[in-house]
Image (spheres, rainbow, N blue to C red):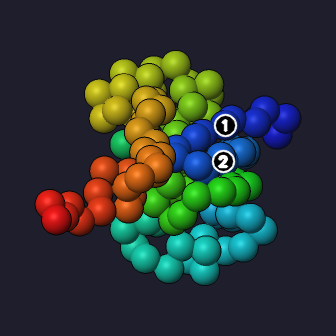
Amino acid sequence: MTDKIFVGRRKNSVARVYLRVGTGKVTINKREFENYFPLSYHRDTVVKPLMLTETLGKYDIYANVAGGGNTGQTEAIRLGISRALVDINEDFRSVLKVERMLRRDPRMVERKKYGQAKARKRFQFSKR
């Protein structure tokens, strides 16, 4: 598994994920997992595919992620890990598919329109 790159995307985040047989070490952008994502919610989101497939601690994960914020980056990494696990063992597909781990979330930020304060918020209306 050293030469395959799996890509995950969410919002404006793009993650390149590498999976290797190992002890369960997670490295993101050459930093330790706990330092990169200090919130436990984000760490749980990243390792959820491993927990569902009962492979937690069997693979080392190396991820390079750019763009977006914490939530987008965690979900991009999660998609990359899910795709890598399916490539390793096709039996994992059914487990991950039920939990919607293999779906690329298409939701993006709506653009701001001219003549408005934000995407949908309008400036205050004045009759006179």
Residue at 44%, 23% in the rendered image? 93
At label 2, counting other C-alpha atoms closer than 10 Å, the crowd grade (few under 14, some 14-19, many 20 or more) is many
For the C terminus, the quadrant is bottom left
> What is the total number of numbered labels drawn onto the structure image?
2
Q: Which residue is mark 2?
A: 15
- Quarter-of-image position of residue 116: bottom left
Residue at 59%, 49% in the rendered image? 12
Residue 94: % across, % down: 37, 21
Residue at 63%, 62% in the rendered image? 26
Determine if residue 56 is in view: no
In the image, residue 91 above or below residue 37:
above
In the image, residue 123 above or below residue 102:
below
Residue at 60%, 50% in the rendered image? 13
Residue 126: % across, % down: 19, 64
The disc at residue 43 is none
Whether residues under marks 2 and 1 lie with C-beta atoms below 8 angstroms apart, the answer is yes
Residue lying furthest right: 3
Q: Nearer the viewer, residue 6 or 12?
A: 12
In the image, residue 103 above or below residue 27:
above
Q: Nearer the viewer, residue 74 or 110?
A: 110
* Kind of residue at disc 2: Ala
Q: Secondary structure at mark 2?
A: strand
* Kind of residue at disc 1: Val
Q: Secondary structure at mark 1?
A: strand
At label 1, counting other C-alpha atoms closer than 10 Å, the crowd grade (few under 14, some 14-19, many 20 or more) is many
Q: Which of disc 1 and disc 2 is earlier in sequence?
A: 1
* Mark pair 2, 1: CA separation: 6 Å
Q: Which residue is mark 1?
A: 7
